[in-house]
Image: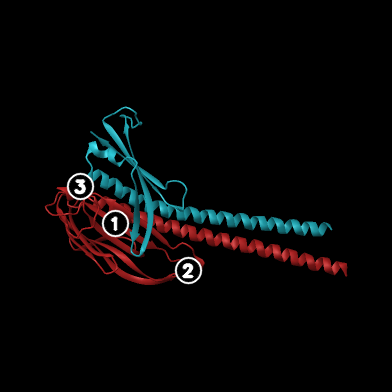
Amino acid sequence: MSVILDNLSAVLVSGAVLLLIISTQFSAQQATAEQTIAYMAKMSTMKMVDYLEDELLLVGDGTENAIVDLTTNSDGMTTNFSFWRQDDLGADMLVTYTLTEQDSVEFNDGWVQMYQFNRFENGVAAGGGSSTLEHFEITMLTETGTQTGSTSAARLLRIRAINVYPYGDPSDSYLHRTFWGITLRPLNLEV
Amino acid sequence: MPQTLMAFLAMMIASIAAFNQLTSRTQSFDDMIQSEYELMANAVVLEQVELIDLGTEYDDLEDWDGAEMERAFTVGDFSITFTLTVNVQFVDEDGVPSEAETDQKEVAVSATQEKFLLPLVTHSRLFSD
């Protein structure tokens, strides 16, 4: 009888230990995958914004005009932003940023509409960025930091973005957004 | 008796391993969340530095010394408020703080947030006479 009980308890204990180790290992794998995806999404966002920072500092560089149009939708998102700058050969170039709707994705806090960031040079598609933007906005600020709709009064450009990174079952993931923002001072807006 | 002790030891080791893994995961998520806050703080601090640069004459920079203000990082429906602190001091040509008056001033803006004990980011900019 005692041999049976010993064996039974050994099976129970080893089963419990095995389950604990397996669940720990599974949890570690899931966390590692989620963190890697979050890291890659952040790198992707930073790559796009590095380019934006470099380019927006050149607004109006060497051209007669600077900002042409800034259109914002009812959600405060910039759907069209056009400005003049010089290209690498010194010719005037009209650069336009637009957003186009992509798929929606469901997170714990509801459905999120994602957008693709597009870039055009003189009306021709030339580059772009993330296709998982939840929000993207460019705001013109005066020298006192107040928002303005006047391109002639603008001295600063405030850019804000949210990039989402859907992964697996949203209810199992904790982080699925990365935020970014900067305020730039294109010197040619002051001329 | 030895079997019982061995079983207890096995369960204890497995529990410690699980606890360590959970702690590590929590720490890792905390770090990721802090990095998000740092990116947002970076945005509001840089904006304040630009505003000081744009709107203040060199001789008036001291007016900002010790100033504290609340600034929000707002995007869409999301908003987080940071407290910014400005510090202005003279620095020598090597950028070392100087008690004596020099031809350069360093304006440093730091951002703190109630969830974190230490400043999240600090940006400095040198201004020359």
**Nearer to us in this view, A34 or B116:** B116
Instruction: Pinpoint the chain carrying mark 2.
Output: A
Query: Which callout, 3 or 1, points at the residue further toward the start of the chain?
Result: 1
Image position, residue A119 (x, y; %) = 25, 61
Instruction: Pinpoint the chain carrying mark 1.
Output: A
Give the residue at mark 3.
A187
Q: Which chain is cyan?
A: B
Give me the residue at 83% from left, 68% from top. A5
Q: What element carries label 3?
A: helix
Query: Which callout, 1 or 2, points at the residue further toward the start of the chain?
Result: 1
Specify the colour of chain A.
red
Please, what is the three-letter code of the amino acid marked with disc 1? Ile
The number of callouts visible is: 3
Contact? badges 1 and 2 (CB < 8 Å) = no
Give the residue at mark 1.
A159
Instruction: Pinpoint the chain carrying mark 3.
Output: A
**Nearer to us in this view, A91 or A146:** A146
Image position, residue B39 (x, y; %) = 38, 52
Q: How crowded is mark 3: few (under 14 residues within 10 Å), some or many (20 or more)?
A: some
Give the residue at mark 2.
A170
Residue A131 in sight: no
Q: How crowded is mark 2: few (under 14 residues within 10 Å), some or many (20 or more)?
A: some
C-alpha span from label 3 to label 1: 16 Å
